[in-house]
Amino acid sequence: MTPVTFNDQTLSRRAMKAELLDAETELKLAYAWRDQRDEAALHRLITAYMRLAISMASKFKRYGAPMGDLIQEAGLGLMKAADKFDPDRGVRFSTYAVWWIKASIQDYVMRNWSMVRTGSTSSQKSLFFNMRRVQARLEREAQAEGRTLERHMLHAAIATEIGVPLHDVEMMDGRLSGSDFSLNATQSSDEDGREWIDTLEDDGEQGSEQVEFDLDNAQLREWLVVAMSSLNERERFIVRERKLRDESRTLESLGQELGLSKERVRQLEAAAFGKMRKSLEAQSREVQHFLA
């Protein structure tokens, strides 16, 4: 699909003047793009609904993202909708496009909200965009009734209201309440104070873990050598070419080299793997018996 630029300063003004498509015209344009990849039809379709994209982008200004970036993300969502829209399903393009536009904007907002990823699951996404609104309403209702909502009660009520797990609410509350700090900041005002990054545990492999890893790898290689020895020469060749090369060869290319059909090579490969599996299982049982 030819990319469209959405950062033109006159985009909003042009979008407001764009034509309004009736259902029949919209359908013709959608078919022209889907079936003939008619870029003129695509451009007309997108231009007509940029008004919708800009309107949806404006609703996310409160998250602090530049309006130009929000409009660009909305436009990208609109293009994805146009590319994936199936006019045979009997749904108006505008109805279909709303989901793609909203998803594109929300993904952008969440990516740029914090250096730490705010969430990726559907429940976390729902919380990010609805939690504060629901929380404010629940607190207003409790105050009007003369009740005080403890933190754990508020979290439980939010979880029920939005339909998400309680632990997701607790996690999102912490993320939305905090802010980003530099790990190179000192822990005290003293110039010689230790930086926060110095307190992080080294997540690299420890010496004992590396030794265990090397031993396991050596054992596995030994088992594979024994398993490969149980195969005949042709089977070993097929396994090597299919599984031990950086770029695996196709069944068809092996068949041409061996003078066999593609199906026959597949059968030989399956038989070889079966033999190797039995060999590996037998060796594993021997080790377990030895350790018992």
Image: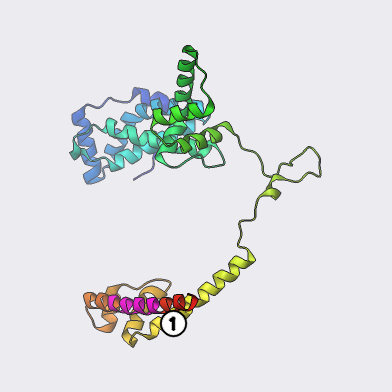
Q: Is residue 191 above or below residue 221?
A: above
228 or 69, which is in the foreground? 228
137 or 83, which is in the foreground? 137
Q: Which residue sits at x=20%, y=29%?
A: 23
123 or 254, which is in the foreground? 123
Q: Residue 289 location, x and y as percent?
A: 44, 77
Taking the magenta stretch, the answer to whether it contains residue 49 is no
Asked if residue 6 shows in the view, the reply is no
Residue at far bottom of view: 233
Question: Is residue 264 left or right of 217 when viewed as pictured?
Answer: left
**Predominant secondary structure in magenta?**
helix
Q: Residue 101 location, x and y as percent?
A: 37, 34
Taking the magenta stretch, the answer to whether it contains residue 275 is yes
Q: Circle 1 is placed at which residue position?
A: 225
Q: Residue 20 location, x and y as percent?
A: 27, 25
Q: Residue 27 location, x and y as percent?
A: 20, 34
Q: Is residue 199 above or below residue 122?
A: below
